Image (cartoon, grey):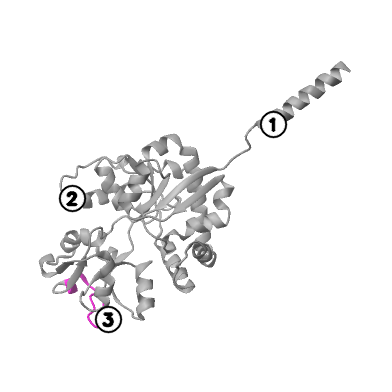
Amino acid sequence: MRIAKTIAIALLAASAALMSAPSWATDTVKVRFSWKLKGEYSFFYLGKDEGIYAKHDIDVQLGEGAGAQAALGSLVQGNEDVVIVPAIFAISAIQKGMPVKIAALYQPSTPFAFISQPDKPVTTPKDMEGRSLAVSIGDTATSYLNVFCKINGIDCDKIKQVQIDPQSKIPQFMQGRIDLITVYTNVDLPLIEERSGTKFAVLDLPKYGLSVPGLAAVVSNKGLSDNADILKRFFTATNESIDFARKDPTAATKALMNAWGAAPSEALVRTTIVKTSASLSSPAGKPHGWTDEKTISDAQELILSTEEGALRKPSSDFYTNSLLEP
């Protein structure tokens, strides 16, 4: 009887311990985009909707942004775990001392272009001379216009640069007041062409030598040190989501539109997702987001040539591939 009573007490104690112990919980990862919803972000929503992040014990929280600088600032303050921004902005910030690193570079080269009206086409760099070009703060392409001119042997002084508010450049362009504007060919160009019913002339910038690192995931140095395991699971799930979006862009479209209150047409969203998927690349045999040292080195040269007071730093200061390794 005593033995039985002792066993019963032990079982009750064990049961109480199990009940009081915390169950296996998912880890929250807060992700902030640099801008409003667009096709570039679809695979994050697909991964969330399809339970890919949950499978890796990640509760991913996704939020729109108001610019790369604001997103990076929020990351450093500890309000976000990951921010999705154009890599060139992160490289510039790191050069100025911001304690962050590129953890995944999905677009080694930004898919952007100058577009012009079909009746006044500009399809080669030389065609730009004598034309007007909208220039805005934060416009990556026009920030490196002098570099582009030098690469292609054209006279930048013969291009009329018109400072214009980013919100006004498309209306000004459509009204014929500006000859050239910058667009992202994976998201902006399909939208403008659908809404205007016009097929514009395109001057592809990477084709003519202006390669600027694009879509990237950035983490803080503190997060990299303190939460490496959580972040590794997040990036593993993200890469699975990218593969899923490539195989099933219709599912990716549905997932994004579920979160997008004022989304454009389903056909347009699907087009931007397909074009974005085509723009993502990594070195052979490496996972999505793997950063090549030369890409960072070349980007640093761009910044050194245009930003006064910029100092050269080791490439390893700017990125890490550790969160993408098995």
Sequence-wise, the earlier of marks 2 and 3 is 3
Give the residue drawn at x 53%, y 66%.
254
Position of 101 relative to 146 (above/below): above
Label 2, label 3: how many angstroms apart (C-alpha)? 35 Å
Where residue 118 is drawn, which disc sits there?
3
Residue 210 in sight from this viewpoint: no
Judge from the rendering whether residue 131 lies leftward or rightward of residue 29; answer left or right.
Answer: left
**Toward which corner of the image does residue 110 lie, by quadrant?**
bottom left
Disc 1: which residue: 18
**Toward which corner of the image does residue 13 lie, by quadrant?**
top right
Label 3 sits on a secondary structure element that is loop
Where residue 307 is drawn, which disc sits there?
2
Sequence-wise, the earlier of marks 1 and 3 is 1
Residue range in magenta is 116-128
Which SS does the magenta portion mostly show?
Answer: loop
Q: Nearer the viewer, mark 1 or mark 2?
A: 1
Give the residue drawn at x 13%, y 65%.
156
- Along the line of sight, the residue nearer the viewer: 4 or 226: 4
Label 1 sits on a secondary structure element that is helix
Label 2 sits on a secondary structure element that is loop
* Magenta highlight on residue 185: no
Instruction: Report the amino acid beneath label 1.
Output: Leu
Rendered-image quadrant of the N terminus: top right
